[in-house]
Image (cartoon, rainbow, N blue to C red):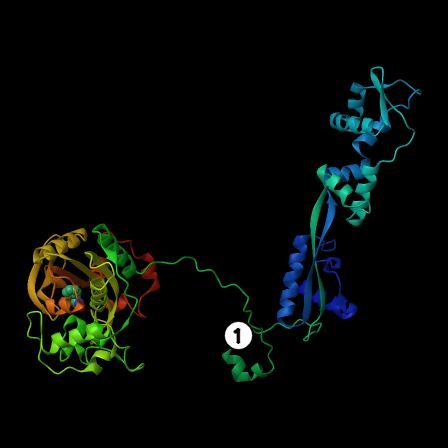
Amino acid sequence: MAEQLQQLILDTLDREKEIKDTRTLTIPGDAAPATSQEAQLVVQGALNSLLSKEMVTYSMQEAFAYALTQEGNDIADKGSHEAVVWSVLPLKGQGAPLSIKDLKQKVGDETAKIGQGRAFKNGWIAKEGDGLVKLTESIDDTTRNELAEIRATGTLAAGEKAIAELRKRKLVQQKKLLWFSAQKGSNFSTSLDKLETDLTAEMLQSGAWKTAKFKKYNFDAEGIPPNGGALHPLLKVREEFRNIFMEMGFAEMPTSQFVESGFWCFDTLFVPQQHPARDLQDTFYVSDPPESLPPPTDYYEKVQKVHTVGGYGSIGYRAPWSDADSRKLLLRTHTTASSSNLLWRLANRKGGFKPVKMFSIDRVFRNEATDATHLAEFHQVEGVVADYGISLADLIGFMQTFFKKMGIHNLRFKPAYNPYTEPSLEIFAFHPMLDKWVEIGNSGMFRPEMLAPMGLPDGVQVLGWGLSLERPTMIRYGINNIRTLVGHKVSIDSVEKSAAVRF
Ligand code: PHE
């Protein structure tokens, strides 16, 4: 039908040059012209399709008109209730008055009721004895006449006031009229070509593409709605970690900064500039822009000093210092860069230092050889607590509570080394499936060489721990190759089917 309608439009335009009112068209398959609003929408579909091929142009026309309700139509056919009542009564003095009961029987209860009132008001009828008579030989049934006029013309010469009255009586309603006027377009023709939607190999081979007509892109078309999204397993586990931290009263730190400077990622954390982790082989450096904005001068000088000559009871590294290394831009190798920035802000905040418990879960990058369990980017889960007089016992306590909420009840701690923490502890848990103790995190008490230059008050200690998001996710979902969790080999199906996580 759609094509027949398009053809009809083209033929009509060919014959008449213009279609002023598409309501005059008869949609193929229908008997009557397309006057209803729904029919006009069908016509619009056909016009749009022709418009996209530039075969026609069209404009939409709208108007309001009045139409009769069911009752209005009845009255236009048979006369108003009052006229019907009047018509069945005998003229005064020319017969026995009609009793109300007989009137009801003749014209029906409803017409008798409504009609009597109006007929009295109009002075058409009167009471005589127990019955009714009519007073005039002829009447002018304005209601009926007005309704007939509206039915024929869609409006009323008597004006809006009379229409409003009829609308109040629910005899007339307002109706929106919709139609289109169409003209020939720049590609007008009466033959409907089937336009190509794809350039195929066959068309290229045969050369048919040279003469083929292609359908234009419709940039206004709405896309196919996706039938639902699904959270990636990493996001589900991340949410679970978030909940654990929130339950423990931690707040999330801002970490939306993948690019950091050598200063924030390493120097402030008392990582010596000669440390192998800072090598090209371990860290991705950014070449453009060539360097970071200058770090805060006062703090920068203190950091440089503690590295080169020491202070706060430390002898420092006593190794050469390079401003350039400090200003190098890199993809952060750990979220501890953000933690460090946060602690510095905390030390320098207007109202003075306040104890905090903060966490972050975000992406980090390391220039590592990739294998089944390592990628060059992964997520770190990190917790930091800063307060007066906290100790290694608090660190161990926090980690025990934290991992217990993950269902890990037995932890072991092994002394380790981080340039920024002392003591440092690696965290191990027993893995029943693997039947051995596996490393699940890294932690420590931040060193004075890191905290003191920031200006944190005396007696404030900071503890922290970190772990990867990928490792527990792989264990939780029984995944043994990280490439099936992250990257282009991930099956969307497995993401959609991945179960919710509750540790
Ligand atoms: N930054 C450490 C890592 O990358 C984790 C850590 C955070 C360790 C805080 C101690 C304190 O493994």
- Mark 1 CB in 8 Å range of ligand 1? no
Q: Quadrant of residue 394?
A: bottom left
Whether residue 72 is visible, yes or no, is yes
**What is the count of numbered marks?**
1
Where does the image place residue 371, in percent across and percent down from the top left? 20, 73
Residue 95 at x, y percent in the picture: 91, 19
Residue 362 x/y as whole percent: 26, 65
Q: Residue furthest right?
A: 94
Task: Please tell me which residue is depicted at 64% across the width and 69% down the height of the picture.
Answer: 51
| Quarter of the image where one finds residue 436 | bottom left
Say left or right for 229 vs 386: right
Vertical comparison of 371 with 389: above or below: below
Residue 485: horizontal and vertical position, in percent? 27, 65
Give SS at disc 1. Answer: loop
Horizontal side of residue 291 vs 212, given as left or right: left
**What residue is at 21 percent from the left and 59 percent from the top?**
352
State which quadrant residue 83 falls in: top right
Residue 203 or residue 345, whichever sits in front: 345
**Residue 371 visible in image:** no
Q: Residue at x 82, y 35 (%)?
A: 79
Q: Give the position of the N terminus as an image quadrant.
A: bottom right
Q: Is residue 193 above or below residue 174?
A: below
Looking at the image, residue 210 sits to the left or right of residue 369; the answer is: right
Residue 16 as seen in the image, left or right of residue 258: right
497 or 355: nearer the viewer: 355
Which quadrant of the render holds ligand 1? bottom left
Q: Of residues 449 and 193, which is closer to you in this image?
A: 449
| Residue type marked 1 | Asp
- In the picture shown, does residue 5 fall above or below 192? above
Q: Residues within 10 Å of mark 1 (few under 14, many from 20)?
A: few
- Residue with the mark numbered 1: 198
